[in-house]
Image (spheres, rainbow, N blue to C red):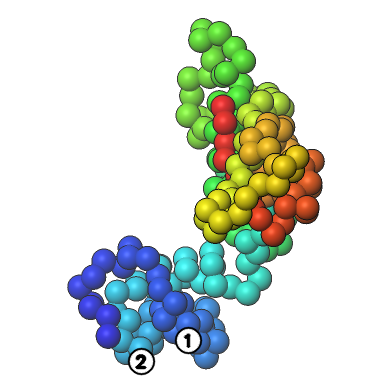
Amino acid sequence: MHDKNMNDRKQWDQYEDECLAEVVKQIGSDDWNAVSDVIAVKYGIKIRSAKKCRERWMNHLKPEVTKDAWTEDEAKILFRCQAFYGNQWTEIAKFLPGRTDNSVKNFFYSTLRRKIRSYNRSRPIEDQIKLSANGVSLNHELTKKVLETSDNRKIIKTVSIRKSERLGRKVKKGQELPKVRFGGEIPDCMSTLDSITCEQINFDFSKYSDEINPTLGYSN
């Protein structure tokens, strides 16, 4: 049983998620105070407020919520809607099925911050943007200018050879080994590493698939 004195900002665990989903299935999601009371009485979870239950369901557990990487089309819709609605994330989320207002807001600001950094890197200090991402977002013309900035970061591909391969396998004479680092342009509108695939960075790992474990990292 969970300690009722624990802070409800504690990370949700699988047991709590399963209990919350079961309660919502039973009584619906119209009354979050009732949901919070039921999981406290029936399952002994007394640290989750109605607000936290709603946030967990709406942003993570609701079946309609998608956690796939953002597509370029979704990004374009988001930026166009933000130019019209401003920072009304709930309204904007209505145009993006499967995306919550919280994920919409997070993606917009992470993209805007990245674009601001790219904008500033290519300009002298006196012409750089000093405003925060939120400050920029309140200026439509400045937001548009920043979002049109090309992202000049590059990705670095790192290849990890399995320990057993490193220790036990000898390289045959004349055998060509894979290169372990190379650069490539990041596709526009991408903000997360898991959005970038081997196909997008034009490198064939298929012939080394039994030997390596590719991971991605950034290089400025």
Label 1 crowd (10 A; few <14 / some 14-19 / many >=20): some
* Residue 174 disc label: none
Locate the C terminus and report the quarter of the image it occupies.
top right
Q: Quadrant of residue 137?
A: top right
Query: Residue farthest to the front?
Result: 173
The amino acid type, in three-letter code, at marker 1 is Val
Query: Which is nearer the N-term, disc 2 or disc 1?
Result: 1
Kind of residue sitting beneath label 2: Lys
Task: Give left or right: position of 77 versus 46.
Answer: right
Q: Is residue 175 above or below residue 153?
A: below
Measure how far apart labels 2 and 1 are at the Cα level.
9 Å
Secondary structure, mark 1, is helix
Residue 185: give x, y in percent of width and height. Answer: 72, 32
Q: Viewer-proximal residue, 99 or 199?
A: 199
Labelled pair 2, 1 in contact (Cβ < 8 Å): yes
Regarding residue 151, the answer to whether it shows in the image is yes
Q: What quarter of the picture does the N terminus occupy?
A: bottom left
Tell me the tag on residue 23. 1
Q: Secondary structure at mark 2?
A: helix
Residue found 66% across the figure and 55% down from its top: 211
The label number, if any, that marks residue 42 in the structure image:
2
The x, y position of residue 38, in whole percent, is 38, 87
Residue at (51% x, 10% y) in the render: 125
Mark 2 Cα shell of 10 Å, populated few (<14), some (14-19), many (≥20):
few
Residue that appears at 64% across and 53% down:
212
Q: Classify residue 140 as left or right of residue 13.
A: right
Query: Is 115 in front, or is 159?
Result: 159
